[in-house]
Image: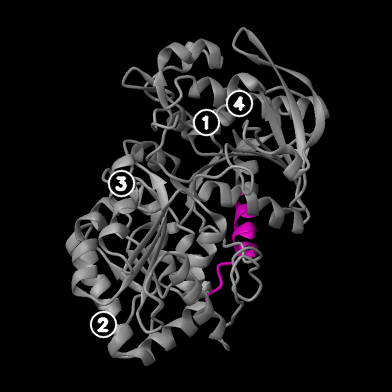
Amino acid sequence: MNILCIASECVPYAKTGGLADVVGALPHYLRALGHQVLVVIPRYGWIDGSRYGLRWFHGPMGVWMGDTLEWCAVHVADSQGDPVHFIESQKYFDRPGLYHDEDFHDYADNPRRFGFLTRAGLQLCKDIGFAPDVVHVHDWHTALGPAYLKIWHWNDPVLGNAASLLTIHNIAYQGKYPAEHMNYLGLGWSNFTADKFEDYGAINFLKGGIVYADMVNTVSPTYARETRTPEQGHGLAPYLNNKGENYVGILNGCDYTRWNPETDQLIPARYSAHDLSGKAVCKRVLQERMGLEVAPDMPIIGIVSRFVEQKGLHLLAQCIEGIVREMRVQFAILGSGEKWLEHVFGSLPARYGGRIGSFIGYSEELAHLIEAGSDFFLMPSLFEPCGLNQMYSLRYGTLPIVRATGGLDDTVQQYDERTGEGTGFKFYEPSAHAIYYTVGWAVSTYYDRPQHIQRMIRAAMAQDFSWERSAAAYVQVYERAIQNKRAS
């Protein structure tokens, strides 16, 4: 089948979270199954065209937004072996951030930016004659796609037969913006109603996308169940429940071509479950790189995360000093986000030299080194739709310490002290108290039951969350979306 994928992020070009990893990996595995996939993302101003071999593909291309004609160009790159098409618009995408400025303030024209991106992706199909069987949109940024198909393109010779799938990567981000943007978006005021796009006087992109999509999915079975509840549905549980069997959870895959300690070129030594000597090398290099005491017998807890409330790091901030004062353990922290959390974690190495190392920002090489060199990987999320780092950690023999929510609960098997079985350590209460004692549980196991740690490492590295399985599940959902489209 022909599949159009429109998204705001895609590795390696633009990334803030797991959305980019999915958009970067899934099309590759869909193509391996024989499907044609057209991927469309913005060309942000900081994407280095020479680095990725961007070349002109199409344009100038006119895109109607309401009664306004916008112009753009389309470039393409296939430096990773899979083509990605970029919508170039200096007006909307030539700025330093994806969604917000350096002070974390949303760009005021975000609804126009991403409404335009979505319309441009559809227009590209029309211009080049690519007739999609399915239009796959991701999160609020491109959630208008299903509505555009049914409002504007229901009888279009190229787009008229296209079904739609909306993937929710994080329901907390819904794209709520002032109603003044409705005319530009061209959705028609008849759609500004409580059962479609209207949300307490504002536009809600994700809400309307859920209503109009032929199928909706999220990125783990547990998160699909959680988001149907008032507690974790963030106001959209009724609309998801209205979808019935047309709302499903598909666990994200793990891209083992990039995250595999046996082949990873970003770490100083490769290793496998049969020979862990390279992991010891990675641990030493990580300790040196992060200014930690070089102590092969002291466990390292790694963290690679966005510093936002969802990730539970404000809870860790309440107990991390107690952990390093009272336990013989080290932390290697990589991330950025809310300024107060950047200050908290960025200042800790000065007070706990040799025990806590932190890097504020993002480094792909350091992320791989933390996965490979750490003994444990901490993810104390308040909620986690899927999570990918715990999957990476499992493959690298770095045992996850996670809150049992969403995909974290689906992918990590709880440690059993009686048998030594399990692949990690899970806690349930979202509190600093729970983090402290679960870290203590993991650290005591490291020192007191090393044979259990070794058994868990072998079990963890044997886990398989490959994209082949997830891609096959997406194909089944595409087929259901097409059936729903034909029946509507």
**Are discs 4 and 3 less than 8 Å apart at CB?**
no
Q: Is residue 31 visible?
A: yes
Q: How is the image coloured?
A: one colour
Question: Which of pointers 1 and 2 indicates the residue nearer the eye?
Answer: 2
Mark 1 vs mark 4, CA separation in Å = 31 Å
Amino acid type, callout 1: Tyr
- Residue 353 in magenta? no
- In the picture of the structure, the residue carrying the numbered disc 3 is 343
Answer few, some or many: residues within 10 Å of disc 1's Cα (few below 14, many 20 plus, some between 14 and 19). many
Q: Position of residue 131 (x, y in %)?
A: 77, 34
Can you identify the residue that label 1 sits on?
A: 212
> Seen from this angle, which residue lies furthest top?
67
> Mark 4 or mark 2, which is nearer the start of the sequence?
4
Range of magenta residues? 463-477
Residue pointed to by mark 2: 444
Residue 224 in the image, given as x and y percentages of width and height: 41, 51
Left-right relation of 137 to 87: left
Who comes first in sequence, dot 2 or dot 3?
Answer: 3
SS of the residue under disc 4: loop
